[in-house]
Amino acid sequence: MLVGHSYAGQVVTSVADAVPHRIRRRIYLDAFVGRDGEAAIDLLPEQVAHHYRESVAGPGFGWLVPVRSLEVLGVTSEEDLDWLRPRLTPHPWLTYTQPLALTGAVDGVPATFVECTDWMRVFQPQAERAEAAGWPVLTVPTGHEAMVTAPEALAKALVDAAEHSLQKQ
């Protein structure tokens, strides 16, 4: 299994397309589900994409996506905030604008989407895209940073996805 969170959905898609024989299942954790020719910025809701472009042009010096507000992402515990803040770094902007170049091999690798539902749900359209493609869509009632705010619920969702993968063999 290969799991990608947020932007890393684009990475999961690219890797699964390049080496489909090495991956049993793709897991998209509140992540982009890009298709051939789509860049991550194209998959964001317009209001969010506009905010990213503005923040890159200003405090991002034209090449970085500044660190997002953890509170907006659903992190509210002071303990979690104190742990996360020193670990955050800006994200290179060009990764958001580079479109996927896929061969189609990725389509042969089963996938599951895990949506985090207790925040502004930026990735809800991606969950809907996954559901329309026939993927299992699981939910975790937490903010975007599920690995910090709901590790037990996330672990359960990942185990459920793995078990689903094993049942399909």
Image: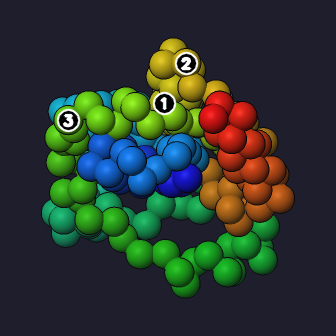
Q: x and y percent of residue 27 in the render?
A: 55, 45
| Whole-number angstrom distance, CA of label 3 to CA of label 1 | 21 Å
Residue at x-position 27% and y-position 49%: 18
Direction front: furthest residue: 169
Residue at x-position 26% and y-position 65%: 92
**Amino acid tagged 1:** Gln
Q: x and y percent of residue 122 in the render?
A: 52, 37
Residue at x-position 55% and y-position 84%: 86
The residue labelled by disc 1 is 126
| Whole-number angstrom distance, CA of label 1 to CA of label 2 | 13 Å
Q: x and y percent of residue 155 in the render?
A: 76, 56
Say whether disc 3 or disc 2 marks the residue closer to the N-terminus: 3
Task: Please indicate whether residue 119 sits to the left or right of residue 7 in the image.
Answer: right
The residue labelled by disc 3 is 103
Q: Depth check: 124 or 21 in front?
A: 21
109 to 95, vertically: above or below? above
Q: x and y percent of residue 42 in the render?
A: 28, 34
**Amino acid tagged 2:** Gly
